[in-house]
Every structure is written in structure tokens, then in C-alpha cells.
Image: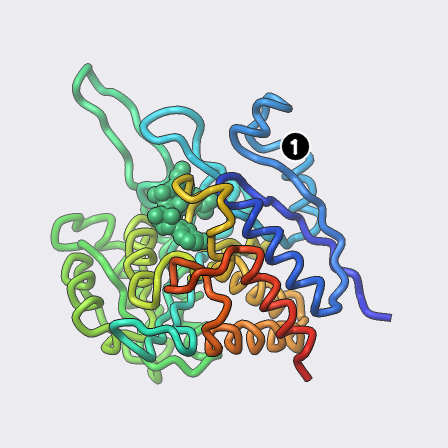
Amino acid sequence: MSKTHTVTLIPGDGIGPEVTDAVIRILDATGVKFQWERFIAGAEAFEKYQEYIPKELYASIERNRVALKGPVTTPVGGGFASINVTLRKKFELFANFRPIKNLPGLKTHWPGVDLIIVRENTEGEYVGLEHEVVPGVVESLKVITRKGSTRIAKFAFEYARKHGRRKIHAIHKANIMKMSDGLFLKCSREISADYPEITYGEHIIDNTCMQLVMNPYQYDTLLLENLYGDIVSDLCAGLVGGLGLVPGANLGTEAAIFEAVHGSAPDIAGKDIANPTALLQSAILMLRHIDESSAADKVEGALERVYAEKQSLTRDVGGSAGTKAFADAVVKAVETAG
Ligand code: NAD
């Protein structure tokens, strides 16, 4: 009898529940057995439980060590702290892994992009230490540590070694932030010395953004601090067709949370137009993580077939199908896969 995987599920808000439903249906079609422990988080959870992250949600991730998560809205300029950042910090999910690749048949300015983004996920500006010194003066702390920088660099180089990647660029602004980004670079350089087969380079963040849109092929793996990684991920999503496509994995030693790069997209929520591909590709990463590689291959093949056929694509990638119709097409492709 095949194993049942118990996984924590956070559908999120905005487009989250729609794309999550689509992905769950596709995963069900693979025949892999899941038991989903479903939780709300953020504003919705506060209304119901007076907690933004219910205690039971923390306990569920602790127990299962793997979660699939839709996007959760974070208020701008005030209100509660980001649920996403809080979960990453709580479980020390220090590596945010985001593969950026074209899908077949999807016309973009740059075909054949194949980039890996490795984003430090727990420190930098995202430690959330801000205060008003005097009225009109706000201080925001950026925390970079030797421990945090070394472990993310090690993660990037280990991944590159294991998967035959050729180059890693550490991306920084150490010309201005000499101490913080300077330490990040120093640690990256030190780790790079243990991986002589991988070419190591350093580029300044502003130049990198220009280089990426002019010629993304010059890069292979990008190693970035938290904020730079957040911004460059969206830029790279734009290279391959947009935020509807790009997956992510938040990885640590205690747990792993799989989620798309995109947010809750309130502008298109509840309209059956969101593209579930990004969350589906995150779920493919999750299937590999839980040793269900043949199911991962099956879903990947089905997804590629639906893109190559171009009949059931969502609006963001030039089609006219809704979220549900796209999911129906992928389910069918999974079911008819050999
Ligand atoms: P966003 O990623 O939600 O949307 C940016 C643009 O991309 C919008 O035009 C949107 O319609 C489009 N888009 C995003 N996902 C799409 C999809 N699957 N299919 C089709 N189009 C898609 O970014 P935003 O508008 O800046 O942020 C909205 C909210 O999401 C904010 O509260 C933000 O804090 C939150 N957010 C959450 C996460 C997360 O949960 N991990 C990540 C990023 C942003």
C-alpha cells in the first residue's frame, strides 16, 4: 500500500484559495495519497481566533515538517507583521529556493532561460526591527550575520555541486553597505573556495538588474540577501512569463514550506482568472522533497503538455481559460499520462 503524506495546507487569501483548489485537484489525480491539515492565517485567522497564526498551525508544521502554502496578504505601512516572514523565521527556513525556467510553447523575449535564485530568508532588512528615533526620523535595522551568510552560501554551492550548475554570482551592494554586504560577500567567497569546480563571481545589485534584462544567459545561480532576492525574483519571473509561473521552496533543517513567488493578487481575486502554475510548480518541488519523484515527473510532463498545446492557458500567459478550466486540462493530462 502506498504511503499517505500528511501535509499542512495554508490556502491563504486573495487568489490563494482558488489556486490551491486547482493544485489539490491536480495532485489528487496523481494517485499520491495526501492527508491535508488545512489552516487559515493572517487577517482571516485574527477575526476568528484573535491570532494571526493559530497555535495549531505552528504545531501542524512542527509535526508534519512540510507545508504547501498559498499567498497571504500583508498590510502596507502598518498593521500586522508578514505571516510569510514570520513562518520563515519561526522555522528557520533560511533558504528560499526559486528556479526560473521557461515553459514550452510560451513566447517570451528570452527563450531557454534557466536560472536558480537562492535567497537568504531570515535576516537582512526583513528582521523587522524598525523604530522612530524622534518624530520624522525612522531607523530600520539590517542584520547580516556570519552564521546566516555562511549557511546560505553553503546551501547555494551544495545545490550547484549536486545538480551540475556551473556558476554562482553573489549579488550585493557592498560598495555602499560595506560592513553588512561586505560580510555577506566575505562569507560567500570563503565558501566558494571549497567548490573549485564552480565559477564564482560578484555583481552589484543595480547592475545585475540591468544585466538580467539585457542578457539573462550570462547567469546560472544567483546568491542574494533577503531583500535583493525578493526583488530580483519578481524581475526574473518577468523574464519567463510573469508571476503566475514561478515556484518557490522555503527550506531549513526542521521544515519546508512550498509556495509561489507571487502574492495574493487582490486585483484578480475571486474571478477565476488566476494562474495556478506557480503554486503547481511549487507542489512539484514538494513532491520531489517527499520522495514522490515519479508523481512529480508526471505532473511536470502534464503541465508542459498543456502549455505546448496552448489550448487551455490562463489570461496572464496569453490564453482565455479560467483557473478551473486550466486545472481541468492538467488533470486530464495527468490522467492520460503513461
Ligand atoms: P502580487 O504578486 O500579488 O501581484 C502582482 C501582479 O501579478 C498583479 O498584477 C497580479 O494580478 C499578478 N499575479 C500575481 N500572481 C498571479 C497569478 N497566479 N496569476 C496571474 N496573475 C498573477 O503582488 P502585490 O500586488 O504586490 O501584493 C499583493 C499582496 O500579496 C500584498 O499584501 C503582499 O504583501 C502579499 N504577498 C504575499 C506573498 C506571500 O504570501 N508569500 C508574496 C508576495 C506578496
The image position of residue 55, as x and y in percent, is 65, 32
Q: Which of 178 and 277 is in front in this view?
A: 277
Q: Nearer the viewer, residue 9 or 60?
A: 9
Residue, disc 1: 55
Q: Which quadrant holds the C terminus?
A: bottom right
Indicate left or right for 126 with 7 as reference: left
The image position of residue 144, as x and y in percent, is 32, 47
Looking at the image, which residue is at 29% across and 24% down? 131
Q: Nearer the viewer, residue 215 or 289?
A: 215
Residue lying furthest top: 135
Label 1 residue near ligand 1, CB within 8 Å: no
Looking at the image, which residue is at 59% across and 29% down? 45
Looking at the image, which residue is at 28% across and 58% down? 235
Residue 231 visible in the picture: yes
Circle 1 SS class: helix
**Crowd around label 1: few <14 · some 14–19 · many ≥20 (10 Å):** few
Residue 89 visible in the picture: no
The image position of residue 178, as x and y in percent, is 16, 50
Q: Which quadrant holds the N terminus?
A: bottom right
The image position of residue 221, as x and y in percent, is 34, 71
Looking at the image, which residue is at 56% across and 78% down? 301
| Mark 1: amino acid | Lys
Q: How many badges with numbers are in the image? A: 1
